[in-house]
Image (cartoon, rainbow, N blue to C red):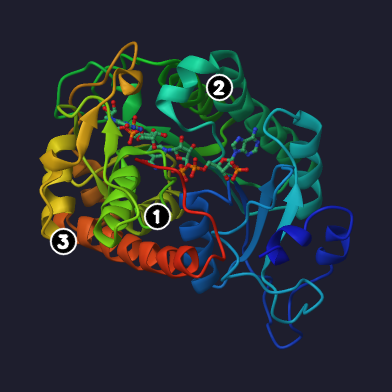
Amino acid sequence: SDSAAAAAGSESNGALAPAIPAAVPERRKVALITGITGQDGSYLTEFLLRKGYEVHGLIRRSSNFNTARLDHIYVDPHNSAKARMKLHYADLSDASSLRRWVDSLVPDEVYNLAAQSHVAVSFEIPDYTGDVVGTGSLRLLEAVRSSSASSGKPIRYYQAGSSEMFGSTPPPQSESSPFHPRSPYAAAKVAAHWYTVNYREAYGLFACNGILFNHESPRRGENFVTRKITRAVGRIHVGLQTKLFLGNLSAARDWGFAGDYVEAMWLMLQQEEPGDYVVATEESHTVQEFLEAAFGYVGLDWKEHVVIDKRYFRPAEVDSLKGDSSKARKLLGWKPKVGFKELVKMMVDQDVELAKREKVLVDAGYIDAQQQP
Ligand code: NDP
Ligand code: GDR
C-alpha cells in the first residue's frame, strides 16, 4: 500500500496540524522515532499509541514506498481527530533535517532506532554504516541538546544499542562487560553508546542506552538469519523452494521477541534517572538449534534442505551472546513474555501463511515465482 508513505513529504505539513481532540484536557505526550519503518519502529509505534502518545516518525526517501510495517496503523492525516501517527522526511545523514523536526515537533521523548542494521552488510559499506550508525546518533543527540537548550523544554533520549558491541567478550554479557566490537556496525554502535553517555555527563541530558540482544518477529527483515530460515520453511513447506543457503550454523544468539523489547525502551525513559540497560532473555541457542526448531515444527528435516555457502560467512564473527539482564529486571520490572519455542512458532506460522498466499498467486499466474532452487 502507498498510503502511509504518501503522508510524508510536502503534504506532511498539513499532517502537523494539531491532532489533539478538544475533549482531551492535557497535551498528549509526543514521541519522535527514527527508524519507524523498521521492525522495532513498528512495534514501538503500536506500543506508544496504546499508551496515548502522539507519534512522529522520520522516514528516508526511497524510490519505492517502504512503509509496509506501518500500513495497518496508518490513518490519513486529514482525519486529524484520529491520526496520531505522522511521518516526515529526514535522514540520519542530514543534521539539518533532524534539528528541524526536533524544533518543530517539541517531543517529550526521542527514540533513535534508525540504522544500517545488518552486520554482514556493514563490511560491504563500512563508511556509510559508520556515518549513519555512529555519527548519525551524534547528529541527533546534538539536535536534541541544542533544541532543548533553546526551548528550555527537557527531552528524553533513547539510543538503540546492541549486544554486538560485546563482540568477542565471553557470555554472560552485562552492563559491566567490556565492549570488543567485531564489525564496522558494532564499532559504530560503540561510538553511539559513548556519545550518548557523554551527552548525559556533559549536558545532563536524560539519555539512555538500551543494550538489546537479538530480537525477532514476523516483521523481521528477510535477510536476518531467523527470518531467512522461517521464510524458507514456509516456501519449502508449500513447494515453492527446496534449498536454503546459509553460513555459520554454530554461532549462538540470545533471541527474544521484538514486541517485548520495545516495552523496555519505553520503561528506560520513564525512570527518575537515566541509565544503560541490557535487555535479553538470558537463554542462548545456536543457528543450528533455530533450524531444528523451525523445520521440525512443520515436520521437515533441515539437513535435507540447508546448503552451506561461504559467501554468508563474515570476515570476523561474534560466536556467542547470552545476556545478563538482571539490572533491567530489577530496576525496570521488565521481563520477556515470549520464549524461544513460541517465537519460532510465531514466525513459522506467519511465513507458512505468507507462502500459501504466494503459491495461490503464482499458480493463478498473477505473480512470477521467485527463482529459487
Ligand atoms: P531495521 O533494519 O528493521 O530498521 C532500521 C530502520 O532504520 C529502518 O526504518 C530504516 O529505514 C532506518 N534507516 C536506515 N538508514 C537510515 C538513515 N540513513 N536515515 C534514517 N533512517 C534510516 O532494524 P530493527 O528495527 O531490527 O532495529 C532497530 C534498531 O535497533 C537499529 O538501530 C538496530 O541496529 C538496533 N538493534 C536491533 C536489534 C535486533 O535484534 N533487531 C538488536 C540490537 C540493536 P528503511 O525502512 O527506509 O530502510
Ligand atoms: P546479527 O543477526 O548479526 O546477530 O545482528 P543475523 O541474523 O544477521 O546473524 C545471526 C548469526 O547467524 C549467522 N548466519 C547468518 N546470518 C545471516 N544474516 N544470513 C545467513 O545466511 C547466515 N548464516 C549464518 C551469522 O553469521 C550470525 O552469527 C542482529 C542485527 O539485528 C543487529 O542490528 C543487532 O544489533 C544484533 O542482531 C543484536
Tag 1 residue: 267
Type of the residue with mark 1: Leu
Residue nearest the viewer, comparing 358 with 52: 358
Q: Assess whether mark 3 and mark 2 are in contact (beta carbons under 8 angstroms).
A: no
The residue carrying mark 1 has its beta carbon less than 8 Å from ligand 1: no
Quadrant of the image where one finds ligand 2: top left
Q: Position of residue 225 (x, y in %)?
A: 31, 38
Mark 1, Cα crowd under 10 Å, few <14 / some 14-19 / many 20+, is: some
Q: Position of residue 106 (x, y in %)?
A: 74, 52
Q: Secondary structure at mark 3?
A: loop
Q: Position of residue 355 (x, y in %)?
A: 37, 62
Tag 2 residue: 129
At x 44%, y 45%, the residue is 221
Q: Earlier in the sequence, mark 2 or mark 3?
A: 2
Q: Secondary structure at mark 2?
A: helix
Look at the picture and state if 273 lies above or below 190: below
Type of the residue with mark 3: Val
Tag 3 residue: 298
Q: Secondary structure at mark 1?
A: helix
Instruction: State whether residue 68 appears in this view.
Output: yes
Q: Is residue 38 left or right of residue 9?
A: left
- The residues bearing labels 1 and 3 have C-alpha atoms spaced at a distance of 37 Å
Q: Earlier in the sequence, mark 1 or mark 3?
A: 1
- The residues bearing labels 2 and 3 have C-alpha atoms spaced at a distance of 37 Å
Mark 3, Cα crowd under 10 Å, few <14 / some 14-19 / many 20+, is: some
Nearest-to-viewer mark from 2 and 3? 3
Type of the residue with mark 2: Thr
Q: Earlier in the sequence, mark 2 or mark 1?
A: 2
